[in-house]
Amino acid sequence: MLPSKDHRLNKEFVSPTVNKQAFEPPAVHSNLVKHLDHTAVSQRANLIMAEDTRQDKRASFSAITEHNTNGMARTSAVASSKSGASKKLVIKNFKDRPKLAENYTEDTWLKLRDAVGAIQNSTSIKYNLEELYQAVENLCSYKVSPTLYKQLRQVCEDHLCLTCCWEKYDIMIRSIFLFLDRTYVLQNSLLPSIWDTGLELFRTHIVSDSAVQKRTVDGILEQIELERNGETVDRSLIRSLLGMLSDLQVYKDSFEERFLVETNRLYAAEGQRLTQERDVNVCACIPLFEYIFSLFRRKPLISCVEKQLLGEHITAMLQKGLRILLDENRVAELALLYQLFSKVKGGLPTLLQFWRDYIKSFGGEIVCTPEKDKDMVQDLLDFKDKMDNVAQSCFTRSEGFINAMKEAFETFINKRPNKPAELIAKYVDSKLRAGNKEATEEELERILDKIMIIFRFIHGKDVFEAFYKKDLAKRLLVGKSASVDAEKSMLSKLKHECGAAFTSKLEGMFKDMELSKDIMIQFKQNQSEPSNIELTVNILTMGYWPSYIPMEVHLPPEMVKLQEVFKLFYLGKHSGRKLQWQPTLGHAVLKAEFKEGKKELQVSLFQTLVLLMFNEGEEFSMEEIRAATGIEEEELRRTLQSLACGKARVLNKNPRGKDVEDGDRFNFNNDFKHKLFRIKINQIQMKETVEEQVSTTERVFQDRQYQIDAAVVRIMKMRKTLSHNLLVSELYNQLKFPVKPGDLKKRIESLIDRDYMERDKETPNQYHYVA
């Protein structure tokens, strides 16, 4: 009738470092009838079978007088059967209901009362459990149930008034009176079950007493504190007491609140110690916290521990440990950190902010350190791969974390205007240039895809376009492109990312190269006079290609004659056009003869002009070479340096040295040796000079000024009248590159000076369009 001894309590291990432990109560039993004594059940097996097979719900009670074990008499009539005939077997109940023996009710109750008393006093029971169960069933069958229920309740209440030892109550009482519970109590919904009756009595007479309750809870908390301090306690006693409080439904009010206060105090001190001690590795605490949390199951206790170990120290933990975890790419700990912080209020937003700040800080060091420019793009690609892996493997591809990463990359990569765009263009050039054997076509495609991800973060895409176009021109004109397919693949990616207008000039460059091939086929077919020089000309549309400074050089008569032949041929087919030769982009293959034998030298046009001079003489000074070739001084110095100071020294310089100085003299190196037959000599076209870099950047700035002017005129033409602030706001929306307010103000002043717009006479910040 009252709570059994077999309640289970979940033990909670708290901290391995201090051997502390906490306890939780079990869940309240929802179906108390299930707590049956297995021994009693097995002893009643034959009784239940007999009960289930009866057709009549009322017992015959012949067992009372005949002492049958199954409590039932049967009569059967078995007729003699004739051969081949089938007979029915008929079982009939007694015609008259058996009568109870005199004083049976009183005697049976005395038996039951003695058995209950023996159970309550932990003494032996004189009667067989099956016999007691049968007695209860017999009394219930004769409508003695109300009296029996009241008598049982009174016996239990009288016992509780005498003693309050929880351990004396056993499940056998409920087992004996199970039939009463299943019939009379079940049919009367207002009556509590035998189990609930016992709980009610114990709660009313024992636990509700404030003194008893306080002493009980104080004792439990004292035992828990002793175990947390590493001492040995009677765990079964604690489990039993907590089970009692849970079954009596007073666990929350009487124990849990005080227990949580003590737990809160303990872990507050423990969390403070773990996060503040200098010798404690915060990263090592993360697995420890996860282990501690995994031992708790009840939500209030978990919330208490999570708050004190994590919630109060989120910022301190991230300041000490997050950068270490990210720098060392400790994926397992980062995943654990994310899981832990997701359990704490405000944990993930704080982690996200620190994650964003880390990316900005680390990426800013890559971009804003000029000493790292050489490896900037590769470092950015590696860093992006690393952060992508963390977001995917550790942060469960959280959309918030992915967006924060994109925002952080866009912020730090534009801290240094223009330079990242320039270096990305040069990195692409290094990958698409012939001789790059670092990657297969599939790997190259993956590299280009990664570069496009970094490219998306750049604001000054026009800077990228200018340098990319210049490098693409060199690759196409000098024949240094590794793969036409790779070039067109990159062009397709840029078109998809920035639109057709961004790539229209780049596509025009490829068209020019294809048309030039067709033109050269026609020229060679129409060429009547043979020549010892094989000429190849590329016709470039000036609007598509980078602008080049014209340079007049002194070409050999054979070259000049061949140029004139081609000019007449081309203008004969395309009237009204003008050709302008660009010697800076020319290259040639020369046949040279040394002591070792004949070689072919693949050189620039400037190198060609210098080498051809040595067909006419043995030695020349730098001044003489300059006068004969007409090459600009700085360009000539670089050209002579490549021929006399590089790896393939086809000229000798006197005096020796790495740099070309005024007064140096040069002669042909007849002793030149090389293992290859065709030798590429440091082609100047593929080396970008500082002047070229500055020139490209200046052209970008000039183009930006034109775009700003065009945007201002376009806006004012549409609006007619506009304030300065609104005009600036419109310009920010339309311009696709970063611009400062001061630069916009200068362009507006320039347009006012050129009478495209004017200021309002009364309101200086108001502009009017001048038609």
Image (spheres, rainbow, N blue to C red):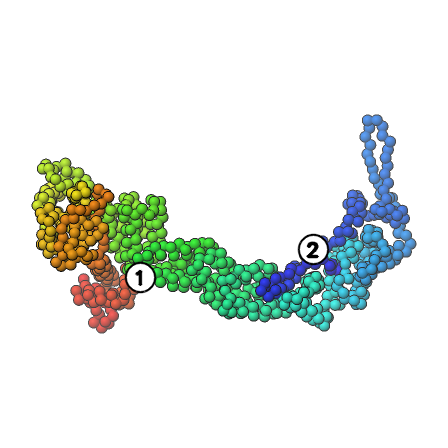
Residue position for label 2: 31
Residue 315 x/y as whole percent: 47, 67
Q: Is residue 497 left or right of residue 175?
A: left
Q: Which residue is mark 1?
A: 371
The amino acid pointed to by label 1 is Glu
Disc 2 vs disc 1: which is toward the camera?
1
Instruction: Assign a secondary structure to mark 2.
Output: loop
Q: Residue furthest top?
A: 83
On the image, the x and y values in percent for residue 213 come to 70, 69
Q: Is residue 172 visible?
A: yes
Q: Nearer the viewer, residue 310 or 719?
A: 310
Residue drawn at the location 16% of the way across and 54% of the way down: 653
> Residue flagged by tag 2: what amino acid is it?
Asn
Q: Secondary structure at mark 1?
A: helix
Tags 2 and 1 in contact by the CB under 8 Å rule?
no
- Say above or below: 645 vs 200: above
Task: Give the residue furthest to the right.
Answer: 102
State whether residue 98 appears in this view. no
- Quadrant location of the C terminus in the rendered image: bottom left
Residue shown at 53% from the left, 69% from the top: 272
Local crowd size for mark 1, using a 10 Å CA cut-off: few (<14), some (14–19), many (≥20): few
Q: Locate residue 647, reporting x and y percent.
A: 23, 50
CA gap between label 2 and label 1 equals 75 Å
